[in-house]
Amino acid sequence: MGVLKTLWHKLGSPRWFYDMSRSWSMIFGILAVLLLGAGTLWGLAYAPADYQQGNSFRIMYLHVPTALVAQSSYLMMGIAGVVLLVWRMKLADVLAAAIVPIGFSMTLIALFTGAIWGKPTWGTWWVWDARTTSMLVLLFLFIGVGALRDAITNLETAGRACAVLAIVGMINIPIIKYSVDWWLTLHQTSSFSLVEAPTMPSSMWAPLLLNVLGMYCFLGAVLTSAVRTGILKREQNTAWVNEVVEQELA
Amino acid sequence: MFFDSFSAFLEMGGHGFYVWLSFGLTGLLIIGNVVHVRMARRNFFREHAQRQTRRKRSGTVPSNSGQNQQHKATEL
């Protein structure tokens, strides 16, 4: 517990985090390239075709990872909002701001690939069923939080307003998750469970696992980089940022 | 390899358009995000260097004691 408490207090110092995270982007980035490269190649060229859907099922290797990362990143933004409102931690606000573009992109990819997959599988690009609609709401939430931040000039007010919106919007996450169980949807229910063995062969789910892990590493790489730049911007009037800039430009 | 030939791989059993469109769009958005964060970082460094030059000219370089003058008291 003591270690955690110290870490929590250190996280209150953006400078400490900046120094800590120097190589994180690189490490996450390399892992993302390796995992996504292997998973995508395996999924596209080596995994067997689905007995019903043929080769269109390979879109799953992008659709599932991006949809997972999209929801996780929204959840992170909501939790960061709580941390900001309760503990006034500056870093949480920098993180929340950094999540918007990547979270938006992941949601957009999940919706795009879902639509493209839907055409040969369901015979339509789009249906207003619970899963697709709640994912569209997620996209609008990301747009809304981003627009709200841009609309308020005062950094502190903007951060708090975005935190409130992000927290309220978290209600959408369980709705997305359980939409396929609560409503009769065209979207299939989850093929995977943490407590049961997968029903598809390993040659089909292993590439998916690689791409899921890879997509999370990609999120890590992008977020670390964006948070580090965000910290420098917030702290631009401090001497330590001047030193950092001078060192890196030298 | 699951496919018999490279052209069969591209064709994806008639689903080539859907599969490659998905992977193409995803690739674009992924690259877009990488470019976005890299440009943001580069732009900050460029703009900060310009600010510093202006400050040095007017003699108002912040000191070590000058903690974040715009927004303080939000730190934990």
Image (cartoon, rainbow, N blue to C red):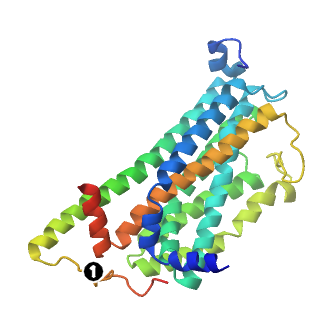
Quick one: A234 or B61, which is closer to the camera?
B61
Examine the image and state in which quarter residue A225 appears.
Answer: bottom left
A39 sits to left or right of A151: right
Farthest residue toward the left? B57
A13 sits to left or right of B56: right
Q: Amino acid at mark 1?
A: Asn
Farthest residue toward the bottom? B73
Q: Secondary structure at mark 1?
A: loop
Examine the image and state in which quarter residue B75 appears.
Answer: bottom left
A131 sits to left or right of B9: right
A5 sits to left or right of A226: right
Q: Position of residue B58 (x, y in %)?
A: 10, 75
Examine the image and state in which quarter residue A19 appears.
Answer: bottom left
Placement of A112 over or under B43, stated as above or below: above
Quick one: B18 or A5, which is closer to the camera?
A5
Q: Residue at x 62, y 66 (%)?
A: A76
Placement of A144 over or under A111, stated as above or below: below
Q: Residue at x 37, y 56 (%)?
A: B40
The reply to whether residue A20 is visible in this rendering is yes
Q: Position of residue A136 (x, y in %)?
A: 64, 55
The reply to whether residue A118 is visible in this rendering is no
Quick one: B65 or A82, which is closer to the camera?
B65
Q: Tell me the subunit letter for badge 1.
A: B
Q: Residue at x 86, y 42 (%)?
A: A198
- Dot 1 alpha-carbon crowd within 10 angstroms: few under 14, some 14 to 19, many 20 or more: few
Q: Position of residue A115 (x, y in %)?
A: 67, 41
Label 1, on which residue? B64
Farthest residue toward the front? A2
The quarter of the picture where the N terminus of chain B appears is top right
Q: Position of residue B7 (x, y in %)?
A: 62, 13
Q: Residue at x 75, y 53 (%)?
A: A131
